[in-house]
Image (cartoon, grey):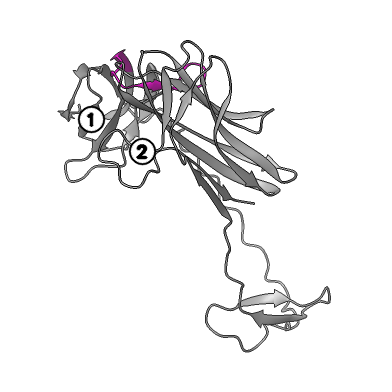
Amino acid sequence: MSSFSISGSGSHALSAGVGALHVHIDTLPVRAGSGSAYPVNWYHVGFLRPGDGTAFWEPIPIEATDAWVSIPNGSTTLGYAVGPGGAATVTEVIGPNPFVGPSGATGATGATGATGATGAAGPGVATGGTIHQVLTKLSSTNYDTDWETPAGASLATANATLGADVTISATNTAFDIVTLSLAAGTWFVWGDMQYSITTQTDCQARIWDGTTTFAEGEGIPRVATDYARISMSAIIALASTTTIKLTAYNSTLANSMTVRRANGANSGANVATQLNALKVA
């Protein structure tokens, strides 16, 4: 096995026959964040992108302190990009891709069976129909069908954005930033919270209904007065109409954290903090 260190961005030639990589984070980038998995999952660390000398496959995020990464057979080059201040060690695993099981043995071919008697002619598919129509049952009676034009799909969505900056004025106190009223059903919900601090301190956010927490995150800007962002998502099954909230906390210093409706610079539309939902069932 061969190992090499990566930082910044660039590419590195891979040894012949590499089927997988072991990636170890030596130093976290200054803007890296962590999730709630165990062992901890990281984001904003960097990406790996294997290629075969003619093109590159899809990027692979670096998400764990020690991670196994499967790469396509025939990879000869590894592109990489690691966040500022970060570094990682990549170790090659020579041999077949360990995430692909061996091929099973081919079974013996069975003897050809005797030809059966010809069956009676069936009713067939209903005549008629036009392009893109589908065959539809009209009743429980056998063969009672017709050609129908399918109804167009309809997706329900919801969105709420922060109307004005909110300063978190008390510690360990929930401040509802934006809310959505969602009907019964299954929803994919995601939220982004942009914030700034005057004194470097830990900041938290969650998506919940006031009782059950569906997603949560925390972060701390690199330096005081800097802007930072917490992003969360969850799939939520609701039995009835429910108010879903994006809520902020500051567990250390009151009045040091402000949730922002816009970026610190080059703001376009005051949508830096928002809560979104897409009904999937």
Residue at coordinates 21% horizontally, 40% vertically from top-left?
52
Label 2 crowd (10 A; few <14 / some 14-19 / many >=20): many
Q: Position of residue 89 (x, y in %)?
A: 26, 16
Residue at position x 76%, y 82% in the image:
120
In the rendered image, which quarter contains the N terminus? Answer: top left
Q: Amino acid at mark 2?
A: Ala
Callout 2: helix, strand or loop? loop
SS class of the residue under badge 1?
A: strand
What span is in magenta?
A: 24-41
Residue 259 locus on image (x, y percent): 43, 29
Marker disc for residue 262: 2
Mark 1: few/some/many CA within 10 Å (<14, 14-19, 20+) = many
On screen, residue 228 above or below 233: above
Q: Is 2 on the left or on the right of 45, as rendered?
A: left
Residue 104: tell me if it is visible: no
The earlier-in-sequence mark between 1 and 2 is 1
Q: Is residue 236 left or right of residue 251?
A: right
Position of 197 with respect to 75 (left or right) is: right
The residue at which mark 1 appears reads as 80
Task: Point out residue 206 in the picture as x, y percentages from the top left corner.
Answer: 55, 28
